[in-house]
Amino acid sequence: MKINDLDLRNWKNYDEIITDSLWLFPSRDNSGMHTPKYHGNFIPQIPRQAMLRFTKRGEWVLDTFAGLGTTLIEAKRLGRNAIGIEIDENTANMARELIEQEENPYNVYTDIIIGDSTKEETYEDLPNFQMVIIHPPYWDIIKFSKNNGDLSNSKTLNEFLERFERVVYLSSQHLDEGRYLVLVIGDKYSKGEWVPLGFYCMNSVMKNGFKLKSIVVKNIEENRGKRGQYALWRYRALKDGYYIFKHEYVMFFVKDS
């Protein structure tokens, strides 16, 4: 089953597609309607790489934590139909405005659903998808909204993981067999201990009928939360015996048949 538009007879022509497990991006793509103003959104290069490699033009992509629509904007550029789920109404409305303003050269369908990605009713009437992208909150590092259903408001690690696994299960019901689920996740540091959210979430995905295909480590450059504070974070790291987060994970899974 062919799951992309690549012609391997011309494999040397695909310089844009990264095949290494270390992704180093010096900066985010802020072209068009992409914006860095939303605290916690991922860089557009991530969904772009995923869709180029593991989807075909005209196929369908689901983003379960849409934010300001990064995945949907890239989907329009690449000719993929895309639906995003966003729990915060204000964020969803801003995303719709940005997505609407992005050019649509391939006349594809994009939409943002205001809803809770842990609730079954949110997925009613959705089509089948050929890719699912999940970029959840990194537990409670950033509070994205005051909504109780927001994963960033989970009171405990177990609660966060249970709700995350619910998102995996529900979204997987709409993913075709043999197609890719892409998880973008980072770890956190709390009370003197490294909390490996990435590997906890990886296990949750694998428990739901997925095979792990690859783990990519992506660099994190100075983000909004640490902008201009590197010296302070370096002092804290030296003082408390830990290392400053400079990476996150992009994990690729295939739905088992």
Image (cartoon, helix red, strand yellow):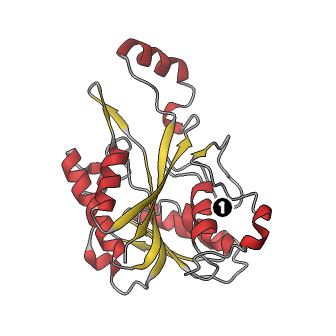
Q: Quadrant of the C terminus?
A: bottom left
Q: Nearer the viewer, residue 229 or 118?
A: 118
Question: Label 1 is placed on what type of residue?
Answer: Met
Mark 1 element type: loop
**Residue underneath mark 1:** 33
Residue 73 in percent (x, y) is at: 61, 67
Give above or below for 244 relative to 71. above
The answer to which quarter of the image holds residue 46 is: bottom right
Picture layout, residue 25 above or below residue 165: above
Residue 131 versus residue 121: which sits nearer the camera? 131
Q: Is residue 202 left or right of residue 26?
A: left
The picture quadrant where one finds residue 222 is top right
Residue 139 visible in image: yes
Taking the image as shown, residue 112 lies to the left or right of residue 97, namely left
From this view, report whether residue 70 is shown above or below residue 9. Answer: above
Q: How many marks?
A: 1
Quadrant of the rendering where the N terminus is positioned: bottom right
- Residue 98 versus residue 232: which sits nearer the camera? 232
- What percent of the width, then of the height, locates residue 45? 63, 55
Q: Residues within 10 Å of mark 1 (few under 14, many from 20)?
A: some
Residue placed most toward the observer, 61 or 40: 61
Can residue 73 be seen in this snapshot?
no
How far from the left and from the top, in percent, is residue 232? 48, 18
> Which quadrant of the structure image shows residue 4?
bottom right
Q: Residue furthest front?
A: 9
Residue located 53% across and 24% down the image: 229
**Residue at 46%, 32% in the rendered image:** 245
Picture coordinates of residue 181, whole percent (x, y): 44, 66
